[in-house]
């Protein structure tokens, strides 16, 4: 994967705790992947909800309530 010019900034702000993820720091690829899976990426979730790895829209809405 080609390194994004914003990679260092993206990594510093990425809250994804899924360690084998190859998309960390590559926000465009991350968004595309999760959109195809009908999910949202980790950056949409607070720390507690991100750690569940439930990236569903339903979990996102539940978190907001």
Image (cartoon, rainbow, N blue to C red):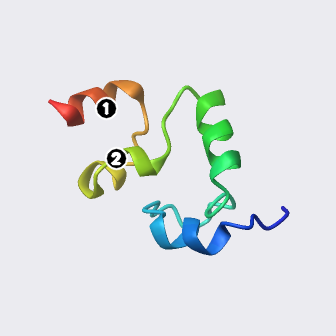
Query: In this rendering, is residue 6 above or below 30?
Result: below
Q: Is residue 15 left or right of residue 21?
A: left
Q: Pick the quarter of the image with the C terminus.
A: top left
- Report if the CB atoms under discs 1 and 2 are less than 8 Å apart: yes
Query: In this rendering, is residue 55 above or below 49?
Result: above
What crowding class fits label 2: few (fewer than 14 Cα within 10 Å), some (14-19), or many (20 or more)?
many
Q: Pick the quarter of the image with the N terminus.
A: bottom right
x then y, percent, for residue 33 = 66, 39
x then y, percent, for residue 3 = 79, 68
x then y, percent, for residue 42 = 45, 50
Q: Residue at x 43, y 51 (%)?
A: 43
Mark found first going from the N terminus, 1 or 2: 2
Which residue is under mark 2?
A: 45
x then y, percent, for residue 53 = 41, 48
Q: Residue at x 85, y 63 (%)?
A: 2
User: Which sits in the foreground, 9 or 47?
Assistant: 9
Q: Is residue 49 left or right of residue 65?
A: right
Numbered mark located on residue 59 in the image:
1
């Amino acid at each position: 994967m080609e390194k994004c010019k914003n990679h260092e900034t993206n990594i510093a702000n990425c809250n994804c705790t899924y360690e084998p993820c190859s998309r960390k720091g590559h926000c465009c690829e991350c968004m595309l992947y999760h959109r195809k899976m009908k999910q949202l990426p980790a950056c949409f979730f607070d720390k507690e909800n991100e750690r569940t790895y439930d990236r569903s829209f339903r979990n996102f809405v539940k978190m907001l309530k």
